Each structure stands twice: as C-alpha cells, then as structure tokens.
Amino acid sequence: MRFEQLAIEHEAGRARQAVFGDICGRLLGHRLRLGFVPWKRVGDTTIIACACPDRFARIRSGLPESFGACRMVVAQGNEVDAALVSLRHRRMVAQAETRVAEDMSCRTWDTVGAARLWLTLAGAVALLLLTAPTAAWAMLTGWAILTLIVNTGVKLAATVIHTRRHRHAPPIRVVGPHDPRRRPVVSILVPLYREREIAGRLVKRLERLTYPRELLDICLIVEEDDTLTQETLSNARLPAWMRQITVPRGGVRTKPRALNYALEFCSGSIIGVWDAEDAPEADQINRVLQHFDKAHKNVACVQGVLDFYNARTNWISRCFTLEYATWWRVILPGVAHLGLIIPLGGTTLFFRRAALEKLRGWDAHNVTEDADLGVRLARHGYKTDLLPTVTYEEANFRAWPWIKQRSRWLKGFLITWVVHSRAPLRLIRDVGLIRFLGVQVLFLA
C-alpha cells in the first residue's frame, strides 16, 4: 500500500477526513510510536494503515468508538511517518516549541522588561562610578570576591567528599552483556547542523557499539533548511538502524526544539542524546541499561562522562581537557554526593522515556536546555545518577569558537537561574533549602 494513494484520497475526500482528523491529532504521539495512521473511511469502517501488524490488536483497542469497525492494511514505517507529518505538520511544530509549561520555560520571559532592568542596573553602576568611584569599585570587588569564595568553597567541598568516597569505593566491575530477555529498544537522538563530512565518521564510531542492532534506533536530526547536512547524509550509506528526521522550519531554530520534534518519532523506552562528533565507549548502552535495572524507579536520568580525543592539538585544547577532567571526574561526582542538583551536560544523557515525557521534554527557547532539564528533573522528584562511562568528543581549540561557546553557556546558566527563581518559595518547596542554595551557587554565582 503506497501513500501516494493516501495523498489522492486525502484531497478527494477532505470532508471525510475531517470527521476524525481532530481525534487523530490528539492521538499523535501514540500513532508515531505504534506506527499507524487512519487512512480512510469506507461506510462505517475505518481503514488503518499500520507498519507493525503485530501491534494492531493493541492499536484497535485504544481507538475511539467513533472510528467504528477498524480494518488494517500494511504499510512501511517511513510512509506512515510521512503521512502523519502531512496531516499534523503545524501541530507537531507548535508542540516542539511549547512542550514545556509556561511557568517552567523562558519563552514567557519579558525580554523588554529584563532589558530595562539590566540597563537600569548598568546606569546605576555607571552613576555610582562617576560620583563615588572608590565605593563603587569596593562594592564590585567585594561582590567578585564573595562569588569566588562561594564557588571555590563548594568545589573544594565536592573535591574532598569525592576523594574520600572514591578512596573507599569498590573497584568498578567489567559489565557483561545486558540480559537479552530484558533488552529494550533504545532511541538515540543525534542533532546535526551544517555537517560536511561527519556522516561517515559517525557511522564508524557508532558501529563499535555492542548493543544489538535490531534494538537500536539512531535518529539523525536535520533542520529542513540545512541542505548541506541533508546532501551529506544522502551521499552516505546509512545502516538500517540509523535514520534521518527532518525538522520543519518554525518560530525558533534550536537544538532543544529539534530534540522535542524528533522525540515523537522515537520507538525506544530509553532515550539517549549524543552529539555529532561523539565517540561513545562500545559497551556504553549495556552499562546504562544495567544501571537503570538496578536503580530506584525515581532515577530518571543517567549522565556519562565527557572527554576529548584531540587533547594535544594546542594549548587551548589542553586547558579544555584539564577543565573537563576536573569537572566530570571530581567536582560533579562531589556535587552529587553533597545532594545538590546536577546541571546536565548536552550529551551522553539517557532518560526513561516516561519521565522525559512527563517533564514535557526540553525547553526549546533555552540555550542551555540540558542544565535547565537537570533542575526540572529535581523539581519533579526525579534523580540523576552519574555513570563512569566515557564519551569522547572534539575539544574546542580555536579562540573565537571557544569564546562563543563559553558565552552561550554563561547566558544559558543565567536564563536558567532566572526561570527557576521567579518563584523562589516554590523552588524551595520543590527541592529543599540546601538544593535551593546550590542553585544560587552553581547557576548565579
């Protein structure tokens, strides 16, 4: 059954489609996961195009009574996806940009009011510098010293507690294969942007994974107007367990928006995120799944360790490597031991799908969507565990890209702090006083 026929039928019988079109929209997420789409009505019967015939009984039991009797025709998965997108294109784009609730998103931030506030503060500082320069410099220096002391204190405490616990920790066991009877489908989201040669190298890196290919769902996410990456992927020979998801144009173009859009197409119960240049350890997915199996149900996220494969390129890359080694292997585990909220990294993240959907995915308007998601996980009572499985990526080794990257991080941390501090008493109720103070140190200071 080809979906060229679906297009003809849809145009010829638009009124007939409208009878159940709105109901289809509400079932969008389930249809994408289960691989089906209502095709047409024949009398009192609804014809269901299905890519997974073995799931049809489950699909039929979940459909509204208004669909009447249901009959199945078999279709290919990519044809079902294309039909779904054509039917509910605008709804999916809008949902990708507004999944997170308004009170937890920065999209409702009053940018005009914020700009006025910052201009007022800058004007007040400038006026103070002109009228009382000694007092102004004393205040600014005092603030800088205070934040430096607080930051250093937290990092020192994290280092001490991690060193003590690491000294008495049992040796890490070599993890064997995951129990084949309990292996779930794992979907990995890999956002790509303006990639010229990454496809071939990415395939070679991911082919080293030991997880069964039939249970891997690697989703390569590409923007609709990124013709360079689309051409690169079209010239690459992607294996059957890797597929391209094209994100339509919208009001914003950000990594979290692309992740939200692609989440609807994922088939796995575990959702992972890697970057285009990542080279994960071969047994990483097996180790993550074993950790989820043994962990408490409130552990919704597992964060791996990031390292670099180009540490010796130049002085900047060496400094970057030292910083990452300190952060991922010492300070962040110490922060976790202190019971503070863990600001997530942008890659080597694995989520229980149910928890990620309960949090409504990523904030499409936040430039550090990972750190923001770490705070929202804690606010909803979920826990993030750190796992010593390493993903290697490319360190920034040029000055200007490093400055832009670091500026984006600082901007995102400030935005995240503003979003979650709009109602400080509610934040204290959600995470407790100690974690609230940790947010002030990790994100503001």
Image: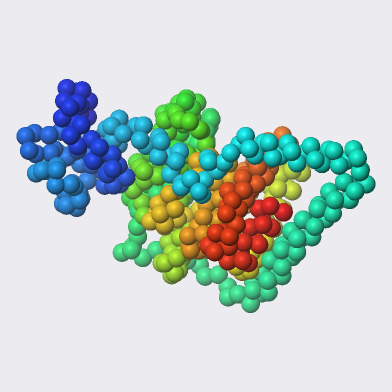
231 or 435: which is nearer to us?
Answer: 435
Residue 236 sits in which quadrant?
A: top left
Viewer-nearest residue: 391 or 200:
391
At a point 65% along the width and 39% down the height, the residue shown is 114
* Residue depicted at x 58% and y 62%: 428
Q: Position of residue 434 (x, y in %)?
A: 63, 67
Q: Is residue 152 visible?
A: yes
- State the count of labels: 0
Instruction: Tell me residue 378's x, y (percent).
Output: 52, 60
- In the image, residue 368 sits, relative to residue 111, either above or below, namely below
Decide if residue 403 is on the left or right side of residue 350. Answer: right
Residue 72 in view here: no
Q: Residue at x 73, y 48 (%)?
A: 318
Q: How is the image coloured?
A: rainbow
Q: Nearer the viewer, residue 145 or 53?
A: 145
Residue at the extreme bottom of the image, as rendered: 168
Query: For the view shown, which residue lies furthest in the left direction?
Result: 43
Locate the C terminus and report the quarter of the image it occupies. bottom right
* Screen quadrant of the N terminus: top left
Q: Position of residue 233 (x, y in %)?
A: 44, 31
Name the one closer to the observer, 207 or 276.
276
> Is residue 86 shown left or right of residue 436?
left
The residue under the point 10% across, 43% down is: 68
- Left or right of 407? Residue 375 is left
- Quadrant of the rendered image containing residue 90: top left
Q: Is residue 345 left or right of residue 287?
A: right
**Residue 373 locus on image (x, y percent):** 52, 52
